[in-house]
Amino acid sequence: MIHSNVLTDLAVTSPSKIVLLVIDGLGGVPLSSNGPTELETAKTPHLDAFAQRSICGMMDPLAPGITPGSGPAHLALFGYDPFKYSVGRGVLAALGIGFELQHSDVAVRINFASIDEKGIISDRRAGRISTSTNNELCQLLQNVELQKVQFFIRPVKEHRAVAIFRGEGLSGKLLDSDPQRVGLPPKKVVPIAEEERNPETQRTATVVNEFIEQAEGILRDQESVNFILLRGFDQYKPLPSMQERYKLEAAAIAVYPMYRGVARLVGMDVLNTGETFNDELITLRQNLEEHSFFFVHFKKTDAAGEDGDFQRKVQAIEEVDRNLPDLIEVEPDVLIITGDHSTPALLKAHSWHPVPFMLHSKYCRPDSVMQFSERECAHGSLGRFPALHVMPLAMANALKLQKYGA
Amino acid sequence: MIHSNVLTDLAVTSPSKIVLLVIDGLGGVPLSSNGPTELETAKTPHLDAFAQRSICGMMDPLAPGITPGSGPAHLALFGYDPFKYSVGRGVLAALGIGFELQHSDVAVRINFASIDEKGIISDRRAGRISTSTNNELCQLLQNVELQKVQFFIRPVKEHRAVAIFRGEGLSGKLLDSDPQRVGLPPKKVVPIAEEERNPETQRTATVVNEFIEQAEGILRDQESVNFILLRGFDQYKPLPSMQERYKLEAAAIAVYPMYRGVARLVGMDVLNTGETFNDELITLRQNLEEHSFFFVHFKKTDAAGEDGDFQRKVQAIEEVDRNLPDLIEVEPDVLIITGDHSTPALLKAHSWHPVPFMLHSKYCRPDSVMQFSERECAHGSLGRFPALHVMPLAMANALKLQKYGA
């Protein structure tokens, strides 16, 4: 694998435009051995026609056999080694709601939960309370006061919120308080094993436990929600930006908070956009001049896959296909269409399977793939390759990389 | 390449079963440019039908162009980087006959040989003596006495035996006494170049040369066998077990000692079995409940290849094919069929060629490969990949790996 420094040394700025369309959870699996996948079932005349003038292949999101979370999968697509750069759930959640994290902030996800009179968890989601109840609870909990530590709590959605601790000498190396099962008491927050003797981590644990205690007091009078569970502690350290690494003016067009968050992590401008794919494409057209790289995210495929809804995933893919002419009309110098990972309806979850990939540019050297599908892309000229190859390939096709050596 | 620690962190135990069938030396080469390989010649209706519901590819045993020995080839299949973990022939041979090696034992392979009156080797195998003669000779040589070092000698088969030296401060970094050619005298055992000044290695060389001298005295009265040649010194250090690495209850079903040995090295339970492939499959069925991973080894293909017997290799492959329905009937959640390396009859030896590979599971995403062969598997959706990818892929398809990151 090429070292990212080499890429930085070779990168040059130029007016050419790269668009990376990520169809979330694109890859699928047949429902029966000889059947078609979701993508093979979908009627995709525009994607297929585009495949015919692209170079295609199958991309491994992280590594063969490894199922990625959304964070690592996107980091890899953006060229950041996911085994080197990790992002915890807490930081992803805070970034995802647009909270402006500062360097060294410790963030953690919160579930509003129910415990019984014996202190045993009876519902890890407090009956999936509404987002507006969540809002009110967060306002109450914002009254918590901690010594020498600034504290923020923000609603995410339904029973999920995020807390941020800001101050000198904090650490994110803490274990969850959430035992991940009902019928157990919540745990005290403690440092991870390697950090047991680290005073900063010990102090952070004390601060967090103090927060939990105060929160318990505040929630005591609430009906079903009378406790909070914490998981996914992480400390925010921005990654080297795509500007620094690739000399790209990168922008993100994504509807969902999580993807906006991970884009912000690598220094992308996160553009305001609407709720639909069509809205996203309008945003792309309107902002085309100001940036040289666009990450466009389409979520519905993944959501349908997670729900195990094969047919809805097929329809989501067909929605992309219907809108594709509008994207092609923008005429980016490099247009890449792929997924961040597979989410087969059969598995109702992210999976390890490689993802169909196609790249078109004036210089792409098209292969003989006639259809954008798992089986066909496996015969593409790019072969099978890791997601970390995507950025060098995109930059090269945009003529944004100089020659290496004389 | 993903670090094995990542895999260990993601591994979960589950009742699903993985079977890895290794057809030793499976890959072949045509006898003439446009001819078929051994596998392409064989009538394999069951393997072909299975390929049609599997995902296929071509596996590089170690790395492109590198011909593997049996030890490294199997270690790689089991997910142990063969360039990091090495196992000498001596240790493999001792493990293979079921000798219970202890940590730091030094083991070496022995050939019973013949030298003439001038001390020149006339036959490196002493006319391939029978195993029963070998037995008697080992009993005689067990009378050797060495200072402060325990010594064991055990017959393997025909002219091959294994010697084990046990004691404090021994080293396995010694060169062979076997010059690998007749017409030369045997060499004195000396440390490898880097260890020339290491007192432990020097002392071990002295001990081993003392053994050779005493053995010569004991064998003097024998008819054709009057000398021993030593090769493949190695010191035994058990590897992290498959249980530790993958949380798998791994079992080996293999007839030949060498493969039983390498399985034991990675902590597999080595099951008692009969002499035929059919016996092995019966053993599999009988032990299915107790383990989650089965390595099943079939030897005849390699033996025929080594003998340069194209037709016998074809027949051996057909024997696997005939028995395949019995294996499929076991219904493992993941069934992988491949080889450890190629042994083309044309070369009469192991070779560097990649090996046909297929994996079936409910989630395998079958490709369009219609026949289990070198040419067809090269068009499989797995593409070309190193053997180190096999375990992550097997674990993923058995749903034994958690998601990486959020």
Image (spheres, coloured by chain):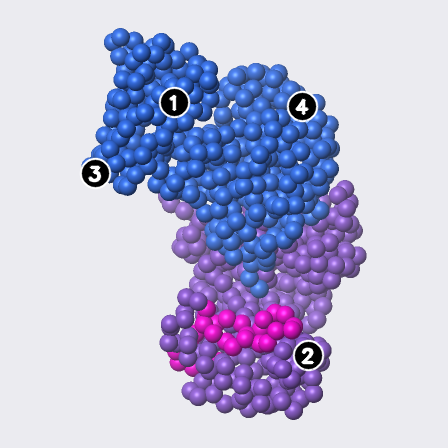
Chain colours: A purple, B blue
Residue stretch in magenta: A165-192
Q: Position of residue B118 (x, y in %)?
A: 25, 9
Do discs 4 and 3 share a chain?
yes
Do discs 1 and 2 share a chain?
no
Closer to the observer: label 4 or label 3? 3
Do discs 2 and 3 share a chain?
no
User: Dot 1 lies on which element?
Assistant: helix
Q: Residue at x 51, y 46 (%)?
A: B242
Q: Earlier in the sequence, mark 4 or mark 3?
A: 3
Q: Residue at x 73, y 27 (%)?
A: B45
Do discs 4 and 2 share a chain?
no
Q: CA distance from mark 4 to mark 2?
A: 61 Å
Chain containing the residue with disc 4:
B
List the residue tagged with mark 4: B318
Closer to the observer: label 3 or label 1? 1
Amino acid tagged 4: Glu
Q: Residue at x 33, y 19 (%)?
A: B228
User: Dot 4 lies on which element?
Assistant: helix
Dot 2 crowding, Cα within 10 Å, few <14, some 14–19, many 20+ = many
Chain containing the residue with disc 3:
B
List the residue tagged with mark 2: A126
Question: For the stretch drawn in magenta, what is the main secondary structure?
Answer: loop
Dot 1 crowding, Cα within 10 Å, few <14, some 14–19, many 20+ = many
Closer to the observer: label 1 or label 2? 1
Does residue B274 appear in the picture of this structure?
yes
List the residue tagged with mark 3: B199
Left or right? Give the position of B387 relative to B323.
left
User: Dot 2 lies on which element?
Assistant: loop
Disc 4 and disc 2 in contact, CB within 8 angstroms: no
User: Dot 3 lies on which element?
Assistant: helix
Q: CA distance from mark 3 to mark 1?
A: 29 Å
